[in-house]
Amino acid sequence: MTTRPKLPDFIIFFSVLALLGIGVVMVYSASAVSAYVNFDDSYYFLKRQIIWATLGLLAMVFTMNIDYHVWRKLSKPIMIATLVLLVLVLVPGLGKVVNGARRWLGFGSIYIQPSEIAKLSMVLFSATSLAKHQDKISNFVKGVVPQLLMLLVVFGLILKEPDLGTALSIGGTVFVLLFISGAKIKHLGSLGAVGVVGIIAAVLFEPYRMKRLLAFSDPWADPLDTGYHIIQSLYAIGSGGLFGVGLGRSREKFLYLPEPHTDFIFAILGEELGLIGTLAVISLFFLFAWRGLKIAMSAPDIFGSILAAGLTTMIMVQALMNIAVVTASMPVTGIPLPFLSFGGSALIFTLAGVGILLNISRYVSKNSL
């Protein structure tokens, strides 16, 4: 680098810390009842979330202090390692099956989700490839197809777990990167059309996905089964009103709403803190997005620009999908809410990605932010 690294962008830093702090509090509030019932310890999930958050912050500090150009050299080895993990998780006896999905690798009580690693790996790989072949991006075969081939491999492996939500979030992120890199609109339009057909096929040929789609269109048609998640989530949000029923006073967390501390934590937040609380969280996400895109537009090189945009998009796509599911704006997909939902792999690798974004901000002229 020709310039000396400066202090990182504090707006992103503190917005992430604020979201993380809210997340730790809400994980405890949302999980205390189920933790006591299932583990005889109201603090079971809280203690684990604090550990994951601490490890995630250490990962963020680590990547924040590594020159982001290093990831350009490491993107291919990281992608290869990720593909190996995605294959291993599908091997019977190696991948752990939970609720019919084979998404975890590990032993004892320590597990990781390779699909969470794939989100970050795909951003690093795409940013490297698009920056290297920037002059070919208008050519579909030489500029777009290389991205699609890797995306299809990753998409297919994650879909096999099965995890359509994560696969779609990765696909959406790559699509945005192709757009900002200068891919032709007609190429993107064709890809979008093919993608929609593929998603429809994935839904039609998998009965449980079809049930989720039907439940989304009319949850009251089956209120005790396929429509149960959506109905209970809307009950929680609707009960919150403007100011909420009060922190820790949720009724839905008393084993009514499934996954209250993971995929549906935003519903509990809406119930306890009301519209004010949900708008505060949404505002923090948009503050993060604004600064992330400012960093992308002001980065000193094309790789930094694409990488910053990819990291910002990766987090925002997940946030928008999660909130859309919780508010019944799209079918249930099982996407966690970044920084807030309980989880290890998702939190650690998301914060590692934030660290890379913060490192890019250290090379941006402060006059351009």
Image (cartoon, rainbow, N blue to C red):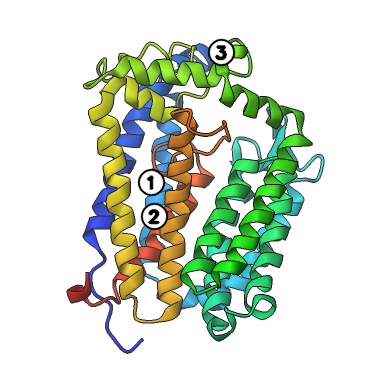
Q: Which mark is residue 5?
A: none
Distance between mark 1 and mark 2 Cα atoms: 6 Å
Picture residue at 24% right of the left edge, 74% below the top: 6
Picture residue at 35% right of the left edge, 34% below the top: 24
| Residue located beneath label 2 in the image | 58
The amino acid type found where label 1 is placed reads: Thr
Front residue of 156 and 345: 156
| Residue located beneath label 3 in the image | 220
Q: Residue pushed farthest bottom?
A: 2
| Residue located beneath label 1 in the image | 54
* Residue 120 visible in the current orientation: no
Q: Position of residue 211 (x, y in %)?
A: 68, 25
Q: Is residue 213 above or below residue 32?
A: below
Q: Is residue 350 above or below residue 222?
A: below
Q: Is residue 306 above or below residue 292?
A: below
The amino acid type found where label 2 is placed reads: Leu
The amino acid type found where label 3 is placed reads: Trp
Q: Name which of mark 3 and mark 2 comes first in the sequence.
A: 2
Front residue of 224 and 3: 224
Please tell me whether mark 1 sits on a helix, a strand or a loop.
Answer: helix
